[in-house]
């Protein structure tokens, strides 16, 4: 884990949990201990690379007609959605 806070449990919406379970069942890398988003290029030994995810993200944004977006857009959008439904957020002390 990157930090002690990375070990904390977090809730996942049932809809997202269902999507992730279906993805794992359809994946060629679905054994316990496999990466959830395993890279076929790396034969499942590593997750998809950031560069690959970024290319796919940019292609999707372009196809949607919104141009090139930085990935931090996802973070800020998600935080806004959490705020809209009253999800508490606090920074750890220190």
Image: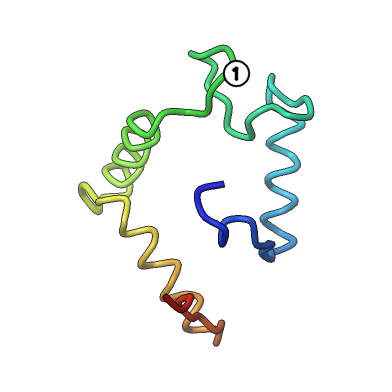
Dividing the picture into quarters, in which one does residue 77 lie? bottom left
Which residue is most to the front? Answer: 94
Could you say where residue 54 lies in the image, as x and y percent from the top left? 33, 37
Residue at image point 57% right, 12% down: 43
6 vs 50, nearest the viewer: 6
Residue 89, image x and y in percent?
A: 50, 80
Circle 1 residue: 44
Pointer 1: residues within 10 angstroms few (<14), some, or many (20+)? Answer: some
Q: Position of residue 53 (x, y in %)?
A: 39, 35
x, y percent for residue 23: 68, 36
Is residue 73 or residue 10 the one in the foreground? 10
Q: At x 77% / y 31%, what residue is drawn?
A: 25
Residue visible at 48% across and 75% down?
92
Q: Give above or below for 9 relative to 84.
A: above
> Left of 68 or right of it: where is 45?
right
Viewed as shown, does residue 33 lie left or right of 56? Answer: right
Residue 49 in the image: above or below residue 2: above
Q: Residue at x 38, y 58 (%)?
A: 74
Secondary-structure class at tag 1 = loop
| Residue 8, image quadrant | bottom right
Q: On the picture, is 1 further left or further right than 49?
A: right
Q: Is residue 33 left or right of residue 71?
A: right
Q: Foreground: 2 or 21? A: 2
């Amino acid at each position: 884990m990157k930090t002690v806070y990375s070990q904390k449990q977090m809730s996942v919406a049932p809809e997202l949990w269902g999507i992730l379970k279906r993805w794992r069942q359809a994946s060629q890398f679905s054994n316990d201990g496999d990466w959830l988003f395993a890279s076929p290029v790396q034969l499942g030994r590593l997750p998809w690379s950031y560069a690959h995810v970024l290319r796919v993200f940019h292609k999707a944004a372009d196809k949607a007609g919104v141009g090139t977006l930085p990935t931090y857009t996802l973070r800020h959008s998600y935080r806004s959605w959490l705020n809209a439904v009253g999800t508490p957020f606090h920074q750890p002390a220190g």
